[in-house]
Image (cartoon, rainbow, N blue to C red):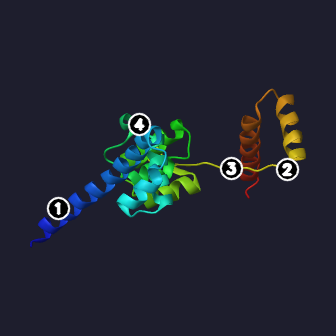
Amino acid sequence: MEIHSWQRIGNQIFVISDASAWWLGDWLIYGQEYYPDRYKTAIAKTSLDYQTLRNYAWVARKFSAARRREKLSFQHHAEVASLSETEQEIWLTRAEQWKWSRNELRRRIRSGIAASDSGSMSTQVRLTLISHKRDQWQKAAEDEGKDLLDWIVNTLDEASEARSSHGA
C-alpha cells in the first residue's frame, strides 16, 4: 500500500470515529425522552463506560447540529463545552481559523492566550481578590467614575508608564 493510500484510509477512519461520538451523544439525548434505562442499554450495546457516554451526550447537548464545526473534531467542541455560547463561538472560530489541534486549543484556553486577527497576542487575566481589597478598589474606581475593570487596567497602565519614564 502506498503512503498516500494509507494516509487517506487513516483520515477516513478518524472522520468515522469523530462522527460516532456525535452520533452516540445524539442517540443518548433522544433516548433520554423515551427510555429510562438508556445508559444501561448503551453500555451493553457499545461496550463504552458510563462516563464516556455521559460526556458524549453532554457535549452533543451543548452543540446543536447547526453549531457544530465540520472542520473541528468532537474533542475540540468538548474543550469549549463548559464555556458560554459566546466564548464557545470565539474559541472555535480561532481554532478553525488558526488550524489549532485539540491540544493547542486546550493550552490556549487554559493560558488565556489567543491569536487575534492581526496576529498579535492577547492575554486573559483572572484575578481573585480578597473581599476587603475588592471593596477598596471598587470605591476607588467609583470615585473616578469608572467601572472596576477599567480602573484596574488604567491603574496598571499608569504604573507601567511611570516605570518606563523613570528608566526602569
**Image depth: mark 1 or mark 3 in front:** 1
Residue 20: numbered disc:
none
> Going from the N terminus, do you reach mark 1 or mark 3 first?
1
Give the structural element (helix, strand or loop) at label 3. Answer: loop
Q: Residue at x 45, y 49 (%)?
A: 38
Q: Is residue 98 visible?
A: no
Q: Secondary structure at mark 1?
A: helix
What whole-number distance in Å separates the C-alpha atoms at marks 1 and 4?
29 Å
The residue drawn where x is 46% and y is 37% is: 33
The percent position of residue 94, horizontal first and vertical second, equals 43, 45
- Disc 2 residue type? Ile
Q: Are marks 1 and 3 in contact (CB under 8 Å)?
A: no
Identify the residue under disc 1. 8
Rounded to the nearest angstrom, the CA distance separating label 1 from label 3 is 43 Å
Residue 130: give its label: 2
Q: In terms of sequence position, does the residue under pointer 1 or pointer 4 come before the other?
A: 1
Instruction: Tell me which label, 1 or 2, sits earlier in the chain.
Output: 1
- Marks 2/3 in contact by CB < 8 Å: the verdict is no
The residue pinned by badge 4 equals 64
Q: Residue at x 17, y 63 (%)?
A: 9
- Residue at which label 3 appears: 126
Q: Earlier in the sequence, mark 4 or mark 3?
A: 4
**Mark 2, residues whose alpha carbon is within 10 Å: few (<14), some, or many (≥20)?**
few
Q: Position of residue 29 (x, y in %)?
A: 44, 42
